[in-house]
Image (cartoon, rainbow, N blue to C red):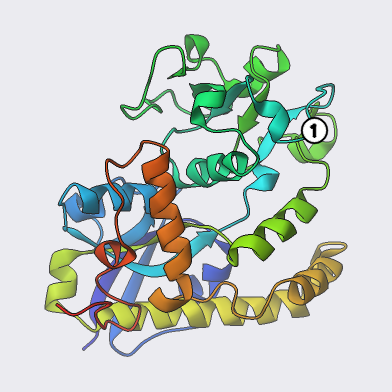
Amino acid sequence: MPITLRLALRDWDYMTPLVLGDVSSPKLEIKVDRVGTLISHVGKSDAYDAAETSFSRYTQLRIDGDDSVVGIPNFIMRGFRHRCVITTKESPITTFAQLAGKRIGVTGWRDSGNTWTRAALRREGVGVEDAMWYAGRLTEAHPIVDRLDGFGRPGLIEAAPGERPMVDLLKEGQLDAIFTPFMPDGYFAGGSGLRQVLSDFRAAEHRYFADVGYVPGMHLIGFKKEFVAEHPWVIAELSSLIDQSQRIWLSKRRKYADTTPFMLDELLKSASELPEGFDASGFVANRKMIADFASELHVQGILPRLVKPEELFPFDTDGSRTSPA
């Protein structure tokens, strides 16, 4: 009899075969709950056995000595961050270096994506101390919550003025740029009045990949420690299913690309411009990226010390240990 795995995931397109049952396991009955907001701490959840988990928050748990969540190096959300910095169409800012001394909004200070974006700015000479930062909600539709996460510093890192939506503040000239994980509603309609800071962000991302050799990972799968202890094989089983789902979806997307004009051209470019396996799961394939992320968290003052990749991921995607016990 298969065991039941209660899994919380966002609606990533390549998870569709897994959700629909096109990939399955005789050992697992996977019940996927599609969530819009990540589970804050799956180790304390009564509803789930595993969940999509923030890389930065998982890292914080590990450094705090909380081992109730076992993360696996299968990064189900990856993305370049150069495209995620927006400003107004009238803004004179066209480079990351020009953000020095400017007012920048972020949707959450220690969010994984924002950590990677600050890393990209730091490569252009703009560190945390070189700008004024405001943390807040992106639009009116987003909730008012604490987005400073305890990292506020008066005069450097503050809450958005009046908790007002940052897109509104940007359009009014109270912010110079915003880091955003997703483009705000209306952005693609053409009349938003907004644009990416970098006009050719794709070229910048090519240069970044040539330098570092990876596409940054932001979310991973976290298991309850007790669930893994009872079923140690579940790590390898779920990771394999996710990889299969991704391969099936890529094949289908290439076949049915005509549903979105120019998608075929984009798929051809991506296939030729990125090496095969750039999104591979597994500890060895991602060790450098994991180490760089841990370093950024430390340099940016989010983690009190530098942690080794093996500290963060004691288990690989096949269930084996990454270092001797």
301 sits left or right of 206 in the view: left
Quarter containing the N terminus: bottom left
- Seen as rendered, the residue at the extreme top is 162
Q: Element at badge 1?
A: loop
Q: Is residue 165 above or below residue 19?
A: above
**What residue appears at the point 70 percent right and 35 percent down from the top-left corner?**
96
Quarter containing the C terminus: bottom left
325 sits left or right of 275 in the view: left
Inspect this view and state whether residue 219 appears.
Answer: no
54 sits left or right of 264 in the view: left
Residue kind at label 1, given as amino acid type:
Thr
Percent coordinates x, y for residue 28 in the rendering: 30, 82
Local crowd size for mark 1, using a 10 Å CA cut-off: few (<14), some (14–19), many (≥20): some
108 sits left or right of 3 in the view: right
Percent coordinates x, y for residue 95 in the rendering: 76, 35
**What residue appears at the point 18 percent right and 46 percent down from the top-left corner?**
64
Question: Picture quarter containing residue 33?
Answer: bottom left
Instruction: Give whichever of 86, 168 is nearer the camera.
Output: 86
**What residue appears at the point 81 percent right and 74 percent down from the top-left corner?**
268
Inspect this view and state whether residue 208 appears.
Answer: yes
Q: Is residue 244 above or below residue 301?
A: below
Question: Picture quarter containing residue 104?
Answer: top right
Q: Is residue 237 above or below residue 46?
A: below
The residue to which callout 1 is attached is 94
- Seen as rendered, the residue at the extreme front is 125
Percent coordinates x, y for residue 192 in the rendering: 79, 29
Question: Picture quarter containing residue 274?
Answer: bottom right
Percent coordinates x, y for residue 241 in the rendering: 43, 81
Instruction: Give whichever of 127, 273 is nearer the camera.
Output: 127
